[in-house]
């Protein structure tokens, strides 16, 4: 599967952005999907993940209550909707996918994932 993340941009603090992870080659619903982010000079951090079945989600504490992840089956994408953005959310955001053990598993570390998109820049100004 090939993944492409898009939807990043420049937004003021308190604003919103919607990131999309588009899958080609296979349907996105065949995989568990996660979003990660990496700021300059820092490690790649977990943001959110969704199970293959779509019923289970998991969020990093720093984004809980502000970000949501869901599947758009019709568009074969996984959406990361971001609200109440803060300057420390500034990073390159990556989506990743893997074939899961079952429909309910979610995965929250980079090494869990086999496929990665190219990343999209999110910049939040103060």
Image: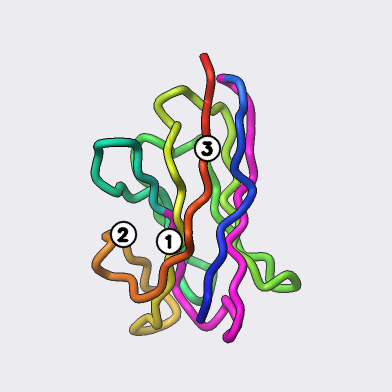
Which residue appears farthest toward the right when viewing the image?
Answer: 74
Give me the residue at 56% from left, 64% from top: 4
Quadrant position of residue 90 = top left
Q: Earlier in the sequence, mark 3 or mark 2?
A: 2
Q: Position of residue 10 (x, y in %)?
A: 60, 30
> How much space separates mark 3 and mark 2, taking CA atoms?
20 Å
> Which mark's residue is nearer the viewer, 3 or 2?
3
**Where 72 sits versus 9, above or below?**
below
Q: Is residue 68 left or right of residue 34?
A: right
Q: Secondary structure at mark 3?
A: strand
**Where 63 sits versus 23, above or below?**
above
Q: Secondary structure at mark 1?
A: strand
In reply to whether residue 28 is colored magenta, the answer given is: yes
Magenta-highlighted residues: 13-35
Q: Nearer the viewer, residue 59 or 44?
A: 44
Q: Is residue 116 left or right of residue 7?
A: left
Residue count near mark 3 (Cα–Cα under 10 Å), binned few <14, some 14–19, many ≥20: many
Q: Which residue is mark 3?
A: 122
Q: Position of residue 5 (x, y in %)?
A: 56, 58
Q: Which residue is mark 2?
A: 108
Q: Which mark is residue 34?
A: 1
**Mark 2 in CB contact with mark 1 (< 8 angstroms):** yes
**Mark 3 in CB contact with mark 1 (< 8 angstroms):** no
Q: Earlier in the sequence, mark 3 or mark 1?
A: 1
**Where 12 sits versus 67, above or below?**
above
> How much space separates mark 2 and mark 1, taking CA atoms?
7 Å
Q: Nearer the viewer, residue 65 or 23?
A: 23
């Amino acid at each position: 599967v090939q993944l492409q993340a898009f939807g990043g941009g420049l937004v003021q603090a308190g604003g919103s952005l919607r990131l999309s992870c588009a899958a080609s080659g296979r349907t996105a619903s065949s995989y568990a999907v996660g979003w990660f982010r990496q700021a300059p000079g820092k490690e790649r951090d977990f943001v959110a993940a969704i199970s293959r079945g779509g019923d289970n989600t998991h969020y990093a504490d720093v984004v809980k209550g502000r970000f949501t992840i869901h599947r758009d089956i019709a568009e074969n994408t996984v959406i990361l909707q971001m609200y109440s953005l803060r300057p420390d959310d500034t990073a390159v955001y990556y989506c990743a996918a893997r074939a899961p053990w079952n429909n309910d598993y979610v995965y929250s570390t980079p090494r869990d994932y086999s496929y990665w998109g190219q990343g999209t820049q999110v910049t939040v100004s103060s």
